[in-house]
Image (cartoon, coloured by chain):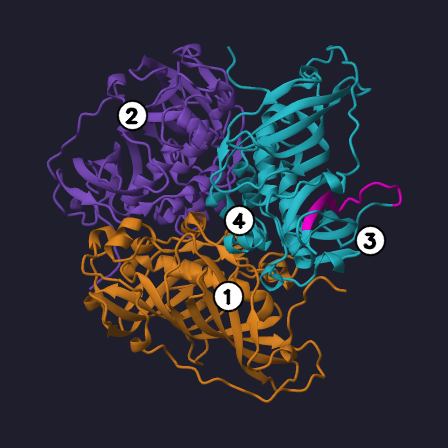
Chain colours: A purple, B orange, C cyan
Amino acid sequence: MGKTSAGRFFEDYAVGQRISHAVPRTVSGGERALYHALYPARHALYSSDLFAETCGLERSPIDDLAAFHLVFGKSVPDISVNAVANLGYAAGRWLLPVYPGDTLRSESEVIGVKQNSSGKSGVVWVRTRGLNQWDDVVLDYVRWVMVRKGNADAPAPEPVVPVLPSAVAARDLVIPEGLDFLQYDFAQAGAPHRWGDYAVGETIDHVDGVTIEEAEHMLATRLWQNTAKVHFDATARDGGKRLIYGGHVMSMARGLSFNGLANAQMIAALNGGAHANPCFAGDTVRAWSEVLDKAETPAPGVGAIRLRLVATKGAAFALRGADGKYLPQVLLDLDYWALMPM
Amino acid sequence: MGKTSAGRFFEDYAVGQRISHAVPRTVSGGERALYHALYPARHALYSSDLFAETCGLERSPIDDLAAFHLVFGKSVPDISVNAVANLGYAAGRWLLPVYPGDTLRSESEVIGVKQNSSGKSGVVWVRTRGLNQWDDVVLDYVRWVMVRKGNADAPAPEPVVPVLPSAVAARDLVIPEGLDFLQYDFAQAGAPHRWGDYAVGETIDHVDGVTIEEAEHMLATRLWQNTAKVHFDATARDGGKRLIYGGHVMSMARGLSFNGLANAQMIAALNGGAHANPCFAGDTVRAWSEVLDKAETPAPGVGAIRLRLVATKGAAFALRGADGKYLPQVLLDLDYWALMPM
Amino acid sequence: MGKTSAGRFFEDYAVGQRISHAVPRTVSGGERALYHALYPARHALYSSDLFAETCGLERSPIDDLAAFHLVFGKSVPDISVNAVANLGYAAGRWLLPVYPGDTLRSESEVIGVKQNSSGKSGVVWVRTRGLNQWDDVVLDYVRWVMVRKGNADAPAPEPVVPVLPSAVAARDLVIPEGLDFLQYDFAQAGAPHRWGDYAVGETIDHVDGVTIEEAEHMLATRLWQNTAKVHFDATARDGGKRLIYGGHVMSMARGLSFNGLANAQMIAALNGGAHANPCFAGDTVRAWSEVLDKAETPAPGVGAIRLRLVATKGAAFALRGADGKYLPQVLLDLDYWALMPM
C-alpha cells in the first residue's frame, strides 16, 4: 500500500466534490512577528493592539494576506501540487479578522472543470474557504489552476465553467463588526491621506525595492505549510532555480505599498490576480498601484477603495505590452478592495 | 582572571560528574512559528490546539525535536564545544510534552569515559535531561562524543563504558497522560494510514527535497542557543564552509517524512542516531524511512511504531556500501519510536 | 497630491520640533524568539521567565537592544531616511523593561541643527523616546545624523549644538523597580564572574565569530520596521551590496559578548556609539570588550559596569590606527552601562 500522496490529477476532479484540506493551524504572535520580519508590513492596524482597539476591533489581527496564505497553503496538496499554472483568483472576501489564538482549517469545493484541447491537462475551478475554531468562515475565494492529467486516456468531463464576477461588488464587502475609523489616528498610521484624497485612475509608485533571498521565501512558504516542491528543491526544475511562491510576491508588494497607501488598512476582497511572470531569488521587487474604484460603506468613517497592485522587477507603471500581454518584468497584477478612513 | 570559557577537555570529565547547563529558556508561540518556518513540519498534533485537544492533550505542544534541540543546545558549551565528533545517541525518551509558556533547563551526568588509543582524545558518555519549571523531566537521553584532550600528558582514566540498549523497549515508552487516538481525525491529519497499515520491513520514500541555505540553519541553531562556532563562522573550518548542526538535518528529515508518515505524530523515544556525513549549505536533503518494529501501547487507540529515518543528499534508500560503511550521500541515520493511531 | 513620502531634508528640521513617529507595535513572544534566532543572545534574564522572577522582575523582558531597535526603527522615516551618515549616540537610558504584550511607539524632539560648511547638508540632533501603552517612557536617547539638503538654496539655520555628556553618570542610571541580584543563579546564567571580578581597563576577547547573511539582516531590520532602502535593495547602492543596519551589528556583538560577559545582564545606558565602517553580507563579525568604569547602585546586589563593545571583522582588540581613526576592520564602537550581580 503506497503511503505517499502524489496528489490529484485533472481526471480526479468533478464538479460538486468537496475536499477537506489537512493540517489545521493555531496561530500566535509568532506568525505575526515572522510576517513582519519577512515583509515590510507596517499597516498600523496589524501592528498595534491599541491602534486596532481605537478602530473598534478587539485587538490587532493577523495580516489579511497571512490569513490568505494559511488558508491557501492547506489547499496546495489537494489542488495545485500537480498544477502546471495557477491561472487566476476571483470573488475573494475576507469575512472575519483572524486573531492570535485562532485555529484555521480550509476546505474547497470544485465548481468547474474543462479539459484543454490538447487532451493532456485541464482547468479546475475551486471555491476555497478558511474556517476558524467555531466553524465560522473567515475567508472565501475562487481560484483556478491548470492541472495535468495522470491518465491521458481518461475521458474528458462535461465542461463546466463558472460565471465569476470581474470584481466583488462594493455592496458585498463584509466589514468587520465594530470597525469604526472615526477616531483613526493618521499620525500613528503614518500618512495623512484619506479616502477622499484618492481619485479613480490615480497611480502611485511605491518607490522602494527589495532584493529577494532564497532563505526568506522558503521560510515564508513553509510557515504557511505550502509544500509545493518547486519552491524548495533547487534540483526540481531546469536551471536549478527555485520558483518563488506567488503569495510571497503578493505580500512583498503589499508591504511596499505602505509608502503611498498607509491607510489602505484592511483587505476586504480579492477581485482578481495573475502571477504574470515567475520570480526568482536575486530579483529586486518593486510595486506600484492604481486606484480602480471607490465606494462608501455603512461603517462609521470607513470607505472602500479598489486597487490594482502590480509587482515588477523593472520600472514602475510597467504592465502590458502593445500585444496586450504582460511585460516580462511584471510579476504580479492583483486587484483588491481595501478599507480606508474617509 | 580569564572570563571566557574554552569548554571542557577529555581529562576534565569523570564518571559521576553532574553538570547543570546554563541559560534556561521560556518557550512561546514564537519558537513554534519559527519551527514551522524552518522545517516542513505538518504533523497536526503540533500545529493545531484543537487537534491536540481531540487527542486528549491540553493543547498543541512544541514539536518533540524542538524540545530535543533546546535541551541539547544548552549542553553544547559543557559537553561538545571541544568535541571532534558526535558519535551517537541511545536510550532517549520524551517524558512530558512541552507547551508554550514552559521554561526548560538541562543537566547532564557523565556515565562513561574511555581514552582513545592515540592518547590524544577520548570518548565521553553523558545522560542529559531536560527539566521544566516544576523540575519534571521532560526528556532524557544518552549521547557520546569524542573530545580532545587539553593536556596530552593527563593520565588516562579507568575506562567505563556504559551498557546501552540497542533500542528503548516498547514497554518503557512513556505515553503522555490522557493521550487518546480514538477520536483521531485522519482527514485533518492529512493521511488515512493507520498503525495497522504499516508492516515491519516496509520502506517509504518521502519524495520531496529541500535545498539548504546558510541563513536558515544558523537561525535554527541559534534559536536553540547552540553556540558551536563551526555552525556560524565560515572562517573556522578549512574550505570556508559552515558545518550544519546535525539537529537541523534531523528536523528537516522528520518534516519531509510527513509525506508517508503523517500519522506518526509524537516521537516517544530516540533509540539511536548517527550523523553519517556532514551537511553543508547547497545540499538538497531528501529522506526515506523503514519500519523497524511495531508495538501496542496501553493508551486508547495508540500504537507505537519504530522507524529508521534516513536523510540523504542522494537517491532514496541509500544507506551503507558493501563495506558496511555509510554511503557518502547519507547524512543521518535516526532510529526512533513514534506514536500512531491504531 | 503626492502620496509617497520622500522624508525630511536638512532644511525641514528646526530646534524644538516634536515628531510623533508612525506605526505603533505590540510585541509578543514572536519578537523574542526571532531575536534569539537572529543573534547568539543568551543572557538568562532575557531567556527565562523563572530566572527573571528570581531577579525580582515580573517575567523575562524583551532584550534591551530589541526595544532599542523597535524605537529606533520607527524614527527612520522621519529622521534618517535622507541621512548621509548616522554620526553618534549619547545620553541613552533604558527606563522600563519591555514585556511581551506591551505596545511601543516613539517620538523625537529636534534639539540641535548645524549646517555643514559645504552648504549641501547639515547635522541634526534629536532626542528620541520610546513610550509604552501607558505613555510611560521606556527608553530615551540622543542621536545625531548628517542629512542632505533638499533645496541647496535654503538658508542655513542658526546653529544649535546641544551639550551632551560623554557618558551617563552612574547616579543617573535607572534600575528597574524590584531588581535584586541577591538570589542570582550564576550556574544558570552561564558564568561565575561577578562585578567584583572585573577591573577597569580589562579587555576581553569574546572568541567567536559569525559570518553574516543577507537574509538574516533583512529579517531583523524589517522586524523593527526600519524602512531604509539601502538595507534591502541591492540595486540602490554602487557595487550592488546592501548596507547592513548598524543595529544588526550591535546585537550581533552584544550576543557574542555573552562569552566573557554572561552576567552583564541588563543594558541600562547607551553612552555613545559609532558605526565605524559599513558591514556587508559575507563579513565575519567578532567582538571584544573593555571595562571602562564601574559603580555601585542602590539596588540589592546590583552593580553597574561601563563597557566598550567593539565589533570587528578582523582581529580582536583592533580599534584605532596611529592617526586616531578607526581601523578599516572596525565596524562598531559602542559605550554602554550594564547591570551585573555584585
- How far is mark 1 from mark 3, CA to CA? 35 Å
| Percent x, y of residue A4 | 26, 58
| Category of crowding for the residue at label 3, using alpha-carbon neighbours closer than 10 angstroms: few (below 14), some (14–19), many (at least 20) | few
**Which chain's residue wears label 3?**
C
Asked if both marks, 1 and 4, belong to the same chain, the answer given is: no
In the picture of the structure, the residue carrying the numbered disc 2 is A177
Which is more toward the observer, C182 or A304? Answer: C182
Kindly state the secondary structure of the residue where label 3 is placed: loop
Residue in the picture at 50% in, 31% down: C133
Mark in front: 4 vs 2: 4
**Which chain's residue wears label 4?**
C
Instruction: Determine if residue B49 is in view.
Output: yes
Kindly state the secondary structure of the residue where label 1 is placed: strand
Residue C337 drawn in magenta = yes
Q: Which mark is residue B106?
A: 1
What amino acid is at disc 3? Gly
Q: Is label 3 in contact with label 2 (beta carbons under 8 Å)?
A: no
In the picture of the structure, the residue carrying the numbered disc 3 is C201
In the picture of the structure, the residue carrying the numbered disc 4 is C60
Q: Which residues are magenta?
A: C322-339
Which is more toward the observer, B94 or A163? Answer: B94
- How far is mark 4 from mark 3, CA to CA? 31 Å
